[in-house]
Image (cartoon, helix red, strand yellow):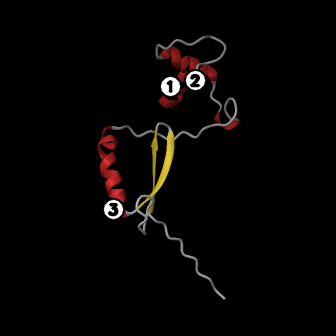
């Protein structure tokens, strides 16, 4: 005996069928909502002015634990040299601030 399983995605707002998942982020949190074509159009229209004036950013995957994984290590001497070349203050030894590391990563 054969069975057929159908998955029907319904709109999270009004329960209508034929919805598709929409992903979005706000304040560093990612969300998903299932919306019908009509509600998706309303959603996109509401966000349009913010998207038009916003900047696209690359998604950053959060790292668990302290430090970076072996594959993601950044040469601290290179960061210090880059910072000095760009007129930023950085100590000769010790910890490099997370802000400075983020600026280096954004520039590269």
The x and y percentages for residue 43 are 35, 52
In this view, 41 is above or below 53: below
Element at badge 3?
Answer: helix
Q: Residue pushed farthest front?
A: 14
Marked residue nearer the N-terminal end (1 or 3): 3
Give the labeled residue for mark 3.
38
Q: Residue at x 45, y 59 (%)?
A: 12
Give the labeled residue for mark 2.
98
Give the labeled residue for mark 1.
103
Front residue of 89/86: it is 89
Front residue of 6/102: it is 6
Q: CA distance from mark 1 to mark 3?
A: 41 Å
Q: Residues within 10 Å of mark 3 (few under 14, many from 20)?
A: few
Q: Residue at x 57, y 22 (%)?
A: 79
Query: Which is in the foreground here, disc 3 or disc 2?
Result: 3
Element at badge 2?
Answer: helix
Element at badge 1?
Answer: helix
Marked residue nearer the N-terminal end (3 or 2): 3
Q: Residue at x 64, y 86 (%)?
A: 2
Query: Which is in the foreground here, disc 1 or disc 3?
Result: 3
Q: CA distance from mark 2 to mark 1?
A: 9 Å
């Amino acid at each position: 005996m054969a069975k057929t399983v159908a998955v029907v995605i319904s709109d999270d707002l009004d329960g209508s069928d034929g919805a598709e998942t929409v992903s979005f982020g706000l304040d560093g949190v990612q969300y998903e909502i299932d919306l019908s074509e009509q509600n998706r159009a309303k959603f996109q229209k509401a966000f349009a002015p913010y998207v038009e004036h916003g900047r696209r950013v690359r998604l950053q995957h959060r790292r668990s634990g302290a430090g970076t994984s072996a594959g993601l290590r950044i040469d601290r001497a290179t960061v210090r040299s880059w910072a000095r070349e760009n007129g930023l203050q950085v100590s000769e030894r010790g910890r490099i601030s997370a802000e400075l590391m983020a600026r280096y990563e954004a520039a590269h």
